[in-house]
Amino acid sequence: MDDSIMNDIYSVFDVAAENTFFENFVSLNKFRREETKREYTGGVKHEQWSYDMTPANAFFVDYLNTLQVTPGLIDHPVYSPDVPKHMSYGALGGFLAPLLFRSIDFYGSRYNEEVEYESWWSANTKLAFLNRTKCIHQMYNVSYKIGDEWYEFNEGDSAAKRDGPGEIGGLRMAYRSYKEYVPDEAEKEIVGLNLTHDQGFFVGYAQSRCQNLPDETLISYLKSGTAPNDLVVKATLRQTPEFAQAFNCQPDSPMVADEICKVF
């Protein structure tokens, strides 16, 4: 570790036991303001993390135009060198590829190539994007029965609305990458699973999003417009023709959307 960098970062952070609580609080606020100023005026520092790196997760940081992947995500069950590549492409690729789409969708449109807050979309591009995504919004018109009560997903201006195009486009991009870079004859089989490689890809994607929510949390999600993972997975797979082909889903199957939405 370079001590000079750490000393520079914390040079304005003056906290001492002899200070009053108010004095330490003022110093903390000053430190945070300096950090924000450094972020916006010092250029993009790709070697620095912008989020807590302890959870198993990944983030697209629009104001830095970077994709940040935590070390915990590159581990079982999302990724393992012992797992066939088709499942890894589905699990890890299906997790990261949607985030790559953030650079060109609603999120990325707000920052130009110099990562300055300036929309690079024309009025016609924005209108076309909004018109195409209307189809996707219908994917989230669902209700959940929890106990004896039914709860509708409150889509509103939710993140699910903005993330939907990237989820669909990202999964298809991960699938195409898998088909291009992983020859069938080089793949290992998983003993006990009677799945084709294409089916394993989508199982890997779905399993990486497994989530067990208490009823109270699920109700809170639905009311606040936070899409539970099972809703995201089902909605995305229904919009993916490659999934229907892999599992031989008929046109009237619940896992086949009435209309396939094409945004990108």
Image (tube, rainbow, N blue to C red):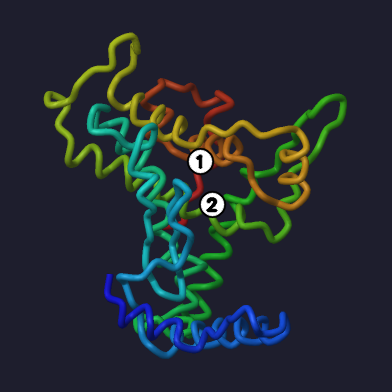
- Can you say whether 20 is above or below 196 in the image? below
- Can you say whether 64 is above or below 154 in the image? below
Give x and y (percent) for residue 195. 33, 16
Mark 2 touches mark 1? (CB < 8 Å): yes
Give x and y (percent) for residue 64. 41, 74
SS for callout 2: helix
Which quarter of the image is occupied by the C terminus? bottom left
Q: CA distance from mark 2 to mark 1?
A: 8 Å
| Mark 2, residue position | 164
The image's mark for residue 236 is 1
Q: Of the residues under marks 2 and 1, which one precedes in the sequence?
A: 2
30 left or right of 55 in image: right
Amino acid type of disc 1?
Thr
Which quarter of the image is occupied by the N terminus? bottom left
249 left or right of 138 in image: left
Label 2 packing within 10 angstroms: few (<14), some (14-19), many (20+): many
The image's mark for residue 252 is none
Give x and y (percent) for residue 137. 63, 51
Along the line of sight, which residue is nearer the eye, 260 or 63?
63
Which residue is most to the top? 192
Q: Quadrant of residue 21?
A: bottom right
